[in-house]
């Protein structure tokens, strides 16, 4: 079974210990020296700060010595292979640059040729349009002239036909009169009966 702990008794013991060790009047004797709890805490803080500082100096010194050893052992790497590769790359770049320049010149020549061809085509198109418009005007004028000539000819023909019709009608009337007169004369002829 578990023992029952008297809580009040434990609290009383803790209070007594606190009075004994935490009061102003408490003095602790270590190695013949007497310390109060406050002095002990200050001494503990000073000692831990000094130990922490010494540890930091030790770590820094250790890193410094490691770096010094690495610097002393450092050997410059052999970069001749890299330099050779760079030289080859430079030659290739020079060749590419020349090719690009040639391509640029060729492209510029093509562009200029295309511009001149387009200008020539524009001039040809303008000339064709001008001549087309002129031909159209001439054709329209010719058509108008032909129309005038046709109208004039039609009027002349119409006039001639009308004149011929009148002449024919006159001739027909004259012929009818002559035929009527002959018929009348033959009917009036006593010999005929």
Image (cartoon, helix red, strand yellow):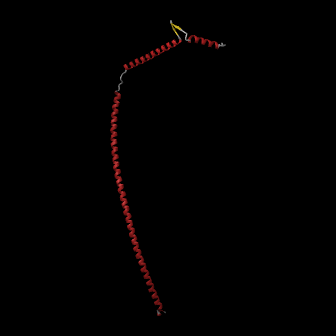
What residue is shown at x 40% (from left), y 73% (from top)?
Answer: 155
Q: Residue furthest bottom?
A: 190
Furthest-top residue in this view: 32
**Residue 148, percent from left and from top:** 39, 69
Where's residue 125, x and y in %? 36, 55
Q: Residue at position x 36%, y 61% from top?
A: 135
Q: Residue at x 41, y 75 (%)?
A: 159
Query: 173 or 13: nearer the eye?
Result: 13
Name the outermost residue toward the right. Answer: 1
**Number of marks in the image?**
0
Q: Is residue 6 left or right of residue 70?
A: right
Quadrant (top left/top right/bottom left/bottom right) for the N terminus:
top right
Q: Position of residue 50 (x, y in %)?
A: 46, 14
Relative vertical location of residue 137 with respect to residue 82 in this rendering, above or below: below
Q: Is residue 62 left or right of residue 90?
A: right
Residue 23 sits in quarter: top right
Residue 121: x and y in percent read 35, 53
> In the picture, residue 25 is in which quadrant?
top right
In this view of the protein, which residue sits in the foreground, 49 or 99? 49
């Amino acid at each position: 079974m578990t023992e029952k702990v008297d809580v009040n008794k434990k609290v009383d013991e803790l209070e007594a210990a606190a009075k004994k060790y935490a009061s102003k009047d408490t003095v602790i004797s270590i190695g013949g020296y007497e310390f109060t709890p406050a002095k002990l805490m200050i001494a503990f803080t000073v000692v831990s700060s000094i130990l922490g500082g010494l540890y930091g100096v030790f770590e820094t010194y250790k890193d410094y010595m490691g770096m010094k050893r690495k610097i002393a052992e450092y050997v410059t790497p052999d970069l001749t292979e890299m330099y050779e590769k760079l030289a080859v790359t430079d030659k290739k770049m020079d060749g590419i640059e020349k090719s690009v320049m040639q391509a640029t010149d060729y492209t510029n020549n093509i562009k200029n040729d295309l511009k001149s061809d387009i200008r020539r085509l524009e001039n040809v198109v303008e000339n064709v349009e001008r001549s087309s418009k002129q031909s159209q005007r001439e054709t329209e004028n010719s058509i108008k002239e032909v129309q005038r000539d046709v109208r004039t000819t039609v009027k002349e023909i119409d006039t001639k036909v009308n004149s011929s019709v009148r002449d024919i009608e006159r001739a027909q009337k004259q012929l009818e009169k002559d035929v009527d007169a002959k018929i009348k004369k033959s009917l009036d002829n006593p010999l005929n009966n």
